[in-house]
């Protein structure tokens, strides 16, 4: 073993622990100011029964490396785990990250069937994971829209057919009573239907309603004024555009989540209608930028985003390492 750093015993990544490690994470990943706040929020939302483990190497106040394994939020299949590696600049290209990965796998509660990891295309992890037997699974483009330069009137024609078909879009808080469980379930079932058509590289397993409600509707940063619902003339819900989570570490920036329309209402410019109204609403609420990630295979949304003025940045690569088993090559 070339590196002789002392490894910590694995421990659960609690919000307090991650808060203490925030200055180090900001130095290790200076291009991701939202990394530590995101990890803290996800830790606070993680159910007690859901596995997660963090180990470190070196001094606790200034570690050489941090490694984390968890159940992937989007793919909670048996034997599937997400791994993360962060290292101080002087340790990124030595043997320590590979050693930490192997130690991390020893913390897993079950033999791995599939390991997932991700890295920005120009970061050191993008070279490490393939060297450790991971294959590229998919790429997602990170893009940013300057709301101050957006002129929705220039693009009104794109959504004219949707309006003529009686489609309208309003913030969720104006169309639903979110204290009513029936309305909560109405939104939940719509989201499940919409996610089924998103071009993910692996089959998504929807969260149970109770988990979704806890992680979305009851989250501290949920804003029903930023989630727009597409409605038909008969008050059916036919699509959504999510623009309600401020990006931690990036002041004045909102995260654009799912924008999708049910199949029977596509081809009318409904996605344009959703995007434009959500952008108007975000600017009216005082936000300056919108940041999003899109699968490189989602040509329809990428085309809309480009015409809206989203500027494409670096790609985030998702890696996968299959260890065999029935869930490793398709839906469980």
Image: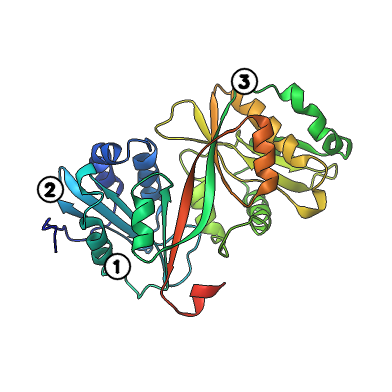
Q: How is the image coloured?
A: rainbow
Can residue 252 be seen from the camera position used here? yes
**What SS does tag 2 mark?**
loop
Question: In front: 23, or 29?
Answer: 29
Work out whether 48 lies above or below 220.
below
Question: In front: 5, or 169?
Answer: 5
**What SS does tag 3 mark?**
loop
C-alpha gap between disc 1 and disc 2: 21 Å
Work out whether 92 lies above or below 285.
below
* Residue 149 badge: 3
Residue at image location 63% in from the left, 47% down from the top: 180
Q: Position of residue 148 (x, y in %)?
A: 59, 20
* Residue 105 badge: 1
Asked if residue 172 lies left or right of residue 73, the reply is right
Asked if residue 53 lies left or right of residue 3, the reply is right
In which quadrant will I find the N terminus? bottom left
Judge the density around disc 2: few (<14), some (14-19), many (≥20) Cα neighbours within 10 Å. few
Check contact, mark 3 vs mark 2: CB within 8 A.
no
**What SS does tag 1 mark?**
helix
Mark before the other along the chain sequence, 3 or 2:
2
Can residue 55 be seen from the camera position used here? no
Residue at image location 26% in from the left, 61% down from the top: 98
Residue at image location 53% in from the left, 74% down from the top: 329
Residue at which label 2 appears: 59
């Amino acid at each position: 073993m070339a590196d002789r750093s002392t490894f910590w015993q694995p421990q659960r990544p609690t919000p307090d622990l991650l808060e203490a490690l925030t200055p180090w994470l900001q130095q290790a990943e200076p291009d991701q100011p939202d990394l530590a706040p995101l990890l803290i929020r996800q830790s606070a939302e993680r159910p007690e029964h859901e596995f997660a483990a963090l180990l470190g190497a070196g001094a606790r106040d200034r570690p050489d490396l941090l490694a984390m394994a968890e159940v992937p939020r989007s793919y909670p299949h048996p034997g599937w785990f997400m791994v993360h590696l962060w290292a101080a600049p002087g340790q990124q290209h030595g043997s320590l990250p590979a050693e930490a990965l192997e130690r991390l796998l020893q913390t897993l509660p079950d033999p791995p069937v599939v390991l997932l990891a991700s890295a920005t295309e120009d970061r050191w992890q993008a070279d490490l994971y393939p060297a450790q037997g991971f294959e590229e699974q998919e790429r997602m483009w990170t893009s940013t829209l300057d709301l101050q330069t957006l002129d929705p009137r220039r693009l009104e024609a794109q959504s004219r057919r949707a309006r003529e078909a009686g489609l309208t879009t309003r913030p969720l808080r104006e169309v639903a009573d979110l204290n009513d469980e029936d309305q909560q379930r109405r939104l939940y079932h719509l989201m499940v239907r919409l996610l089924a058509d998103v071009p993910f590289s692996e089959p998504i397993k929807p969260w149970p309603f109770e988990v979704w409600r806890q992680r979305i509707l009851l989250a501290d940063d949920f804003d029903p004024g930023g989630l727009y619902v597409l409605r038909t003339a008969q008050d059916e819900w036919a699509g959504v555009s999510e623009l309600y989570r401020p990006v931690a570490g990036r002041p004045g920036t909102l995260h654009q989540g799912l924008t999708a329309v049910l199949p029977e209402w596509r081809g009318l410019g409904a996605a344009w209608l959703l995007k434009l109204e959500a952008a108007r609403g975000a600017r009216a609420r005082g936000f300056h930028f919108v940041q999003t990630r899109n699968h490189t295979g989602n040509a329809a949304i990428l085309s809309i985003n480009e015409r809206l003025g989203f500027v494409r940045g670096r790609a985030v690569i998702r890696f996968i390492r299959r260890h065999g088993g029935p869930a490793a090559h398709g839906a469980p």
